[in-house]
Image (cartoon, rainbow, N blue to C red):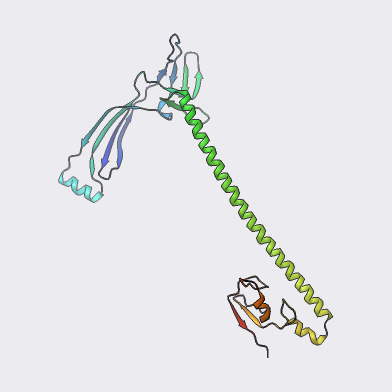
Amino acid sequence: MVWNRTTRLWNDCSKIIHQRTNVVPFDLVPHEDGMDVAVRVLKPLDSLDLGLETVYEKFHPSVQSFTDVIGHYISGEQPKGVQETEEMLKVGAALTGVGELVLDSSSIRLQPPKQGMQYYLSSQDFDSLLQRQESSVRLWKVLTLVFGFATCATLFFILRKQYVQRRERLRLQQMEEAFREHEAQLLSRANPEDRESLKNACVMCLSNFRSCVFLECGHVCSCAECHQALPEPKRCPICRQAITRVIPLYNS
């Protein structure tokens, strides 16, 4: 039996100001005639789904004095009154118990499992209780599959993006190395008077002089014709940063 004393506030909130609980061990007896096996229930309030029946309920409106009104105005809470409620498990109520059975020399006891598993005392029959638990398990399985699939998809897209970026970096490194090897070969085979002009040649066509300054990276690596031939969006061929402005470079 549980006795509650609750304060109901004007903003439709309630808080328990006093609660008294009386717990008495009781026996579960079978419905079949001719069976005298009884199961003693221990710690019934530790169980789930224990449906207590309300046997008494009364609301006492609050009588407020002028001092109470001022105090409630300052605190911001104005109680409507006090509601008393008594709930109990009546004798003869049908219950289904799911827990740990302990057999001793004189009786059989039903108690909460020591492994931390759930303990049930329900007004439903065993099949209904089992069906409800299976429905809950199926729901959790579906949620697990959905979140697992979403996690795998997110991980796949992240790994794919990393792979594409890594492959692009390797391709740029190979292009840069090939360009440097080609430039070194040209410098080695060129005449001494032509080497200076090759050092200032466009990195793309290797024939015109460098005449563009790319911003914001600041690289001077291209001629005007090759800059116009770059695909949109235009990016620096050295660092692959976006080209926001181009400043002409004049050699005197």
Residue at left offset 31%, top offset 33%? 19
Q: Position of residue 63 (x, y in %)?
A: 17, 40
Residue at left offset 75%, top offset 73%? 179
User: Does residue 11 appear left or right of residue 50 in this picture?
Assistant: left
Task: In the displayed orientation, state which residue is furthest to the left.
Answer: 66
**Closer-to-camera residue (120/222):** 222
Q: Quadrant of the N terminus?
A: top left
Q: Within the image, what quadrant is residue 56 found in?
A: top left
**Closer-to-camera residue (98/131):** 131
Name above or below for residue 248 compared with residue 174. below
| Residue 181 visible in the shown view | yes
Name above or below for residue 27 compared with residue 189. above
Counting every numbered tag in the picture gives 0
Q: Within the image, what quadrant is residue 201 found in?
A: bottom right
Q: Position of residue 104 (x, y in %)?
A: 50, 16
Q: Position of residue 167 (x, y in %)?
A: 69, 61
Name above or below for residue 248 compared with residue 172. below
User: Does residue 91 appear left or right of residue 199 in this picture?
Assistant: left
| Residue 111 visible in the shown view | no
Residue at left offset 72%, top offset 83%? 208
Residue at left offset 58%, top offset 75%? 244
User: Does residue 124 appear left or right of residue 211 in this picture?
Assistant: left
Task: In the displayed orientation, state which residue is furthest to the bottom.
Answer: 252
Q: Quadrant of the C terminus?
A: bottom right
Q: Position of residue 238 (x, y in %)?
A: 68, 73
